[in-house]
Image: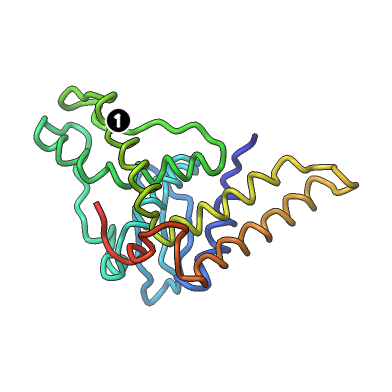
Amino acid sequence: MTHDIEDLIALFDGVFAPSYRTRLVIGGDEPIYLPADAEHAFHRIVFAHGFFASALHEVSHWCIAGESRRQQEDYGYWYEPDGRDAGRQADFERVEIAPQALESLFSEACGKPFQVSVDNLDGAEVDRRAFSVKVAARARRYRSEGIPLRAQALIDALEVFYASEGDSTEGGVTKGDATGQGLEKAVAAGRRRLEAGSATRLAARAADVDTA
């Protein structure tokens, strides 16, 4: 299965640009979230180097950020760079558990392997396995207690698109036509979720509040 970043951008923009005025944008070395301003009509989730995994990760942060956070650059948070000591790394991992759990659900929805990111190559030694266990536990909690609405809308779109991604020539449909039809159906599925205003599980109310 191929994972084309342009497909992901088209899915995200198709689902969220009309209602949340937010677009997914390829950036350079560092990801950043930029709210709309006098020169930009849309909020922008800028992810690094055109990497598919980076895009999913940055979207997961956006799905958790509440309304007030989404009006601030990088949601009003200060990113702690590589080289963290043990205490700062523990703080970093604590706030990364929820977004990486959502990222794992996004990856599952599009059939892409997921690996946690501890992101501290020049700092204190990291127990990747322990962090992975915490992320997996948070993903299970999302499944049982509820997935935030925007995250569920993207999951719906990803599932529809990647379920149909392999239908390239069946029934005389060309690859390009199949991709276009799959994109339309996937975007429609995501928008229906937003319009319904509820996730499949209990935590639809978490759609516009910060969670941990």
Residue type highlighted by circle 1: Val
Q: Residue at x 60, y 43 (%)?
A: 4
Q: Residue at x 56, y 37 (%)?
A: 111
Give the answer, above or below, for where 108 lies relative to 40. Answer: above
Picture coordinates of residue 2, whole percent (x, y): 64, 36
> Dot 1, crowdedness within 10 Å: few (<14), some or many (≥20)?
few
Q: Quadrant of the N terminus?
A: top right
Residue 168 located left or right of residue 76: right
Picture coordinates of residue 16, whole percent (x, y): 50, 65
**Residue occupied by mark 1:** 133
In the picture as drawn, the residue positioned furthest to the bottom comes out as 38
Residue 75 located left or right of residue 198: left
Give the answer, above or below, for where 104 lies relative to 173. Answer: above
Residue 164 located left or right of residue 92: right
Residue 196 located left or right of residue 149: right
Q: Residue at x 19, y 43 (%)?
A: 80
Q: Secondary structure at mark 1?
A: helix
